[in-house]
Image (cartoon, rainbow, N blue to C red):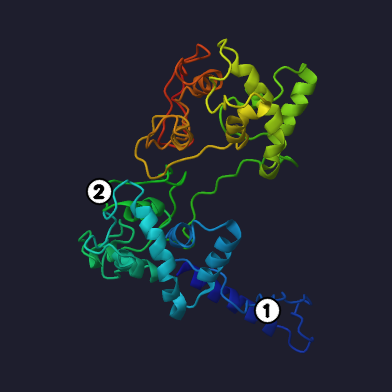
Amino acid sequence: MKVCAIAVISAAMLTGLTACGGGSGGRSAAGATPPVIPSPPAVLSRQIDRMGRAGVNTALVSPLKAAGPRGVDRDNYNAAPRASWGTFKNNIRASLAVYDGLDTICGNQVLANTADTTPARYDSLANALTDDRIYLNAASGSCRQYLAVELNATGLVANNDCGGRTPNYDTIDVTYTALTNNLVLPVGDGVNSDTFLHDENIFPFLAEHVAPPAVPAIAARQVDRMGRAGVNTALVSPLKAAGPRGVDRDAYNAAPQSNWGSFKDNIRASLAVYDGLDTMCGNQILANNADTTPVRYDGLANALTDDRIYLNSGSGSCTQYLGVELNATGLVPNNDCGGRTPNYDSIDVTYTALGSTLAAPLGDNVNSDNVVHSTTAFPFLANPIP
C-alpha cells in the first residue's frame, strides 16, 4: 500500500508541474523546465525466468548432464509457458529416483509408490513438482511453514498454515528433505538462515542493509588446485633443486585438467623412488612385477595423475580416505563414501600407498589435528582454541 501511495503522489506532482506552463510552451510559471519522465524499459519478447518452489529447476532438471546441455534444459524450463510445464515430468522423475537413493534407502521418498518398481513409482511427486508454483491459503492467519498448503493437500503434514514463501524460510532444506526421505530425517545445505532477518510485511521484504566486504582481486590464472593429499609435494620433481622443483610444482598447480597427463612421467619416476624406501622393490600398490621397465608403475601413475577426489554418494558410511579408489582397484573392497574430511590422516594413507602394499603403515608422526573439525557444517571448521 505504501508503494501504491507513493506512485499516486508522484503522478499528481508530475501532472501539476506539467499543467503550470500556461502559454509558456510547457515551462512553469517560474520558467523552469518540468521533469522529463523516462520511457518505460523495453519488454522482452520472451520469458527468461520463473520463480516457484526452491531448487526444483537447479536440483531436478538434468542434474547429471554436462554443463552445456544442462544449461539448455534449464533455460527451456525457465522459458516454458504453463501449458508446457508437463513436458518436464520425465526429466524431473528421473532425478527423483537418484535423490531417493541418497540415504541408501530406495522408496522412502515422499509420495513414492513402493508397490511400483517402474519409473511410475515417482509419478505423484513428479506431478506435484512439475506444477511449479507456490500455493497460498489466504484464509489462514498463521504463516510459519514453507509448502504448508501442498503438505496438507497431500496428507503429509496436516495443518492450516498459509504456506507461501518468505525470505526467512529455509526453503532449500525443506526441498532436500522431501527429495531424500519421508520427512523423518532433516537434510540440509549447512546454511540455516540469512545473516539478517528480512521484513515480512513491507515490500520488497529487504533485510537491514549491510555494506558488503570488498571483493578480492581475482587472479588472472589458476594458482593452485586441491585433490589428493601429497601428490604434488611428494611426487612432482622431489629430487630437483629448490628452484626448478618450484617451477614444476607451480606448473602442476596451474595445469588445466586436459593437461594433467603431461605430468605422468615425472610422477612415475618418483614412484620408483618411493617403492624402494622399505628396501623391497615391487611391493608398491598396483606395481606390475612382470615388467622391469618404468612401465611397471603405470597403474599407480595413471591413477594419481587423475588428481581428484571421488565420492560414492550412495553410501552412508564415510570413514575411509580414498575409499572409492581403494575399492575400484580391488585393494580394499568396501562401500565407503570415500572423499576427504579435515579429520582424516590423509598424508599417512598417501605414504603407506607409495611405500608398500598397505601391509605396513607409514606416517609422518602427526596423527591428527589438535581439535576435531565438523564434518557436517560447511566450511567444516573446528571450534577456536582459547
Crowding near pointer 2: few (<14 within 10 Å), some, many (20+)? few
Image quadrant holding the N terminus, namely: bottom left
The image shows residue 291, relative to residue 338, as above or below, that is above
Reading the chain from its start, which is encountered first: label 1 or label 2? 1
Position in image of residue 76 (x %, y %): 54, 71
Amino acid bearing label 1: Leu
Residue 172 seen: yes
Residue at point 29%, 56% (across, down): 109
Amino acid bearing label 2: Val
Residue 223 seen: no
Residue at point 46%, 18% (across, down): 368
Query: Which residue occupies the foreground of this view, 291 or 36?
Result: 291
Contact, mark 1 vs mark 2 (Cβ under 8 Å): no
Instruction: Give left or right: position of 14 versus 99.
Output: right
**Residue under label 1:** 17
Which quadrant would residue 260 be assigned to in this image?
Answer: top right
Residue at point 35%, 64% (across, down): 164
Position in image of residue 79 (x %, y %): 54, 73
Q: Which mark is residue 184?
A: 2
Position in image of residue 302 (x %, y %): 61, 35
Disc 2 secondary structure class: loop
Query: How many discs mark residues in the rendered view?
Result: 2
Image quadrant holding the C terminus, namely: top left
Crowding near pointer 1: few (<14 within 10 Å), some, many (20+)? some
Instruction: Give left or right: position of 62 versus 221.
Output: left
Disc 1 secondary structure class: helix
Gap in Å between the C-alphas at discs 1 and 2? 63 Å
Query: Which residue occupies the foreground of this view, 374 or 67?
Result: 67
Position in image of residue 363 (x %, y %): 51, 14
Nearer to us: label 1 or label 2: 2
